[in-house]
Image: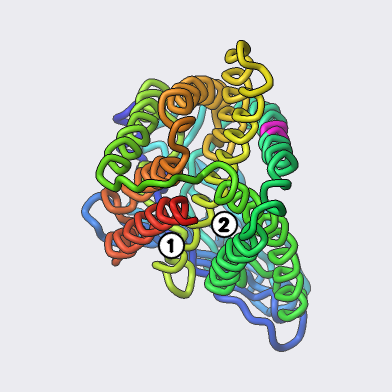
Amino acid sequence: GKEIYDLAMDSYLYGITWNVRFIQFSGLVEDRCQEYIVKMTTDHQGHAHVVHAEHIVPEHFAGADITQEQALQIAYDFIEKKYLLMPQDLSVVLINNDKFDHRRDWTIVMQDTNIFDFALEGQARIAIKVCGDKICSYHRFIFVPENWVRKDQARMMNFNLIQAGCYMLLFFFMVVGLLLGMQTIFTSRFGVNIMHHKALIIALAGIIHACNSLPALIGSFNTAEPFYHQLTGVWLGLISKMSYQVLLCSLLLAIGAVGCIKGKRKHYIQSLIIGISAGFFMIGVDSLIVYMMPQMQPLCGNFQAISHYFSVLALVSNYFKIFSIVLSAFIAIFFIMTKLSHLLVDRVWMNIIMVILFCISLQAIFYVDSMFAMIVSGVSMGLIVSMIFYLILQYDMTLLPIICGTNMISMIMPNILYPTYVGARLDSLIALICMVAVAVYFYERGHQE
């Protein structure tokens, strides 16, 4: 329950943690496996403390060869000093050793019976590793039965299969919209130039994001492999992934610019009111669904941006990428709807079903643990999007960037309300201003001849 959760939080349960890893890529291969890993978090009072520390010691390093009783005494002394727990508060769950040529390591797991005990349904445990006669690793965790883990793995396997199918369906809609709209690019006087312009902007944003994320990428490297080989492989993977995104999004944005997102008169105040209202209507429905079916995700802002060289660039480029993908996807589905509306005048329900399937596949990007919530949200958003299309967008498609921009602003707001690092509010405010500028820019371009 809530009492147990509050009691275990910041001790056996962790929220957002800072993961610091010290590695080396020079020297002998057998020496390079030595690493230092530290995980830190803050408690409710804002005080930082280490929740996990690990020193990975190479097998050939020399150390003491102690007995089981000596290892247990070292573990008891450390736990008493670190966690203020006495031996009578602990119960040994597991103890084993690994014998190397020049030392013996001991792995000890103890149950903390002083806080709570779920018997066979879960326990609060402390894991200690003794390398030679020195503590080289420690952390606290919640142990859950194996059948719980297997059930969750089976559930996630089914969910991942459905999620992959949703991704394929989303890609199918975007490709169909692309094929139907290709003619508009090459028959327009400025279609190809607009496509080049969009591709250049998206590619530039992708390159900036890739270069800015190097610290996070390097942190996942394997020290057994040469540094530059891994760096080259990562770059090739990023380039191949970015290439099809740039091609697909730039083509669809160009189709929108010359084919459907086009208007003759600008009414900024009226457009902003209508577009923002429609966007907030979508946000309200989604928020209601999240309130009724809460997700197992922390209520916090984007904490991954701090692992980049420049956190503000990470936020701006990430939200711009999401904006371009979402806007491209909506251009594709609305272009298909427009074409079908001319062919099937009395079959509006077919368009609505198609939009519902599209929204379910789009929600698969944002829902990562609940299939039922993803489907309910997709169906609800499909009905809302269909209503917005038939009431607003089929008469003025230039409002689409404003609506998408409003939804992007709702994604940025948690970073301002629940900052996860120093300077997060300022970075998020800059990202919000950039998203507003991008949405207005796309609206402006939709009224140029």
Alpha carbon distance from label 1 to label 2: 56 Å
| Relative vertical location of residue 205 with respect to residue 96 in this rendering, above or below | below
| Relative vertical location of residue 153 with respect to residue 80 in this rendering, above or below | above
> Along the line of sight, which residue is nearer the eye, 306 or 385?
385
| Relative vertical location of residue 439 with respect to residue 65 in this rendering, above or below | above
Extreme-left residue of the structure? 45
Q: Which mark is residue 316?
A: 1
Left or right, residue 398 beside residue 274: right
Q: Residue at x 49, y 20 (%)?
A: 383
Measuring from the top left, give residue 308's x and y in whole percent: 48, 70
Which residue is label 2 attached to? 69
For label 2, the SS is: helix
Q: Which mark is residue 375?
A: none
Specify whether residue 239 is in view: yes
Give the quarter of the figure containing the N terminus. Answer: top left
Specify whether residue 74 is in view: no
The magenta region covers: 165-169
